[in-house]
């Protein structure tokens, strides 16, 4: 972490102009989210996971990995849940009743592959079970670049700015052999190593081909509301000594709640639960705001 980053608490409200840009585009690049030492630390930790997957024979045929539910795999990963440079974008756009239900590590070696169509919105059935002109946001993801993705063609995530308010995207090939035509507005999110970007899960996005000679390594952390169920199968063991040693805030962000009512933001009495760790923290810091529903 750089000197300035160490001074950050993660509770600095985001600039209204940045919020506006994020609301308009559906994504936002956070420069230097990870300082050099931290980036190197997490890179080594991801390399360790890759080695474990390889030893277990779990690499995909193209030698890539997409490991879901990895927060318990290194003692420092939980720090990412409220990382000072990125956390303001999470509580500042989602509020306090949140946790990570889905996170993945992606390592993609260079690959010469035919053009493919991978455009999607995240959320699976959230895009089918709810039919309305603009579907609810429900989740944001932060993507941390551990390797340099500043030159196009390195397997960047592609996005269509502003497409989070569109329920459909034209151009999906109907059948095998149909041409793959790049949708209008598609752009690669260029990131230097250590940068991150946050995106609204409704943003139409796609992995792209890694045509470089560099292995791309990314960490994605998805946050959702506590009344939405977990997606990842491998999650932190809440009975473990490690879990019990974590701060109440980290426990919340990993999915803990003392009872069902807690996930709905209330005590069993039906009153709002002021002991929910992130709510408590925001309240103590004077960051709750009656004008903003998710910060009430
Ligand atoms: O790897 C990427 O660039 C995107 C991954 C993705 O969209 C996903 O896992 O949902
Ligand atoms: Fe996705």
Image (spheres, grey):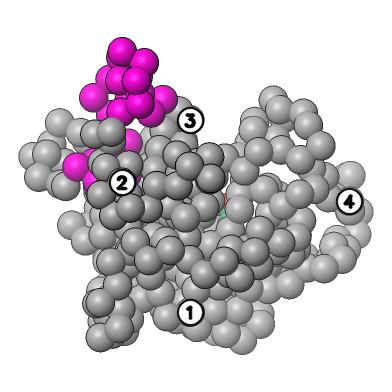
Q: Earlier in the sequence, mark 4 or mark 2?
A: 4
Number of other residues with Cα within 10 Å of mark 4, as a class: few under 14, some 14 to 19, many 20 or more: few
Q: Is residue 60 visible?
A: no
Q: Is residue 128 visible?
A: yes
Q: Between tags 2 and 1, which lies in front?
A: 2
Q: Between tags 1 and 4, which lies in front?
A: 1
Query: Is the C-beta of the residue carrying label 2 under 8 Å from the nearest atom of ligand 2?
Result: no
Q: Earlier in the sequence, mark 2 or mark 3?
A: 3
Q: Quadrant of residue 275?
A: top left
How far apart are the alpha carbons under marks 1 and 3? 30 Å
Q: What range of the chain is rendered magenta?
A: 248-273
How far apart are the alpha carbons under marks 2 and 3? 23 Å
Q: Between tags 2 and 3, which lies in front?
A: 2
Q: 118 or 9: which is nearer to us?
A: 9
Q: Which residue is mark 2?
A: 283
Report whether 177 appears left or right of 283.
right
Residue at the image point whose x is 20% and y is 33% from the top:
238
Q: Secondary structure at mark 1?
A: loop
Q: Which residue is mark 3?
A: 228
Q: 187 or 279: which is nearer to us?
A: 279
How far apart are the alpha carbons under marks 2 and 1? 28 Å
**Quadrant showing the N terminus:** bottom left
**Quick check: 23 above or below 271?**
below
Residue 177, x across and y down, in percent: 89, 53
Report whether 291 appears left or right of 47.
right
Q: 59 or 82: which is nearer to us?
A: 82
Q: Earlier in the sequence, mark 2 or mark 1?
A: 1
Q: Which residue is mark 4?
A: 170
Q: Quadrant of residue 87?
A: bottom left
């Amino acid at each position: 972490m750089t000197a300035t980053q160490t001074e950050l608490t993660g509770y600095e409200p985001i600039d209204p102009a940045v919020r506006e840009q994020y609301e308009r585009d559906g994504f936002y690049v956070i420069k230097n989210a990870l300082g050099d030492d931290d980036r190197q630390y997490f890179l080594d930790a991801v390399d360790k996971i890759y080695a474990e997957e390889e030893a277990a024979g779990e690499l995909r045929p193209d030698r890539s990995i997409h490991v879901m539910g990895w927060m318990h795999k290194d003692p420092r990963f939980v720090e990412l849940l409220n990382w000072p440079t990125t956390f303001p974008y999470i509580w500042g756009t989602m509020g306090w009743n949140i946790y990570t239900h889905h996170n993945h590590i992606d390592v993609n070696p260079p690959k010469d592959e035919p053009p493919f169509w991978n455009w999607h919105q995240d959320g699976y059935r959230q895009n089918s079970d709810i039919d309305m002109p603009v579907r609810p946001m429900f989740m944001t993801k932060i993507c941390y670049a551990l390797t340099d993705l500043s030159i196009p063609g390195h397997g960047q995530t592609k996005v269509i700015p502003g497409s989070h308010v569109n329920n459909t995207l034209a151009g999906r090939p109907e059948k095998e052999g149909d041409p793959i035509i790049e949708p209008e507005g598609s752009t690669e999110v260029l990131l230097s190593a250590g940068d991150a970007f946050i995106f609204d899960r409704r943003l139409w996005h796609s992995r792209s081909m890694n045509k470089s000679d560099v292995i791309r390594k990314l960490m994605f952390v998805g946050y959702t509301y506590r009344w939405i169920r977990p997606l990842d199968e491998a999650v932190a063991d809440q009975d473990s000594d490690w879990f019990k040693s974590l701060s109440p805030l980290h426990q919340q962000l990993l999915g803990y709640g003392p009872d069902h009512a807690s996930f709905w933001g209330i005590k069993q009495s039906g009153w709002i639960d002021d002991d929910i760790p992130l709510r408590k923290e925001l309240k103590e810091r004077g960051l709750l705001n009656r004008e903003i529903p998710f910060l009430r």
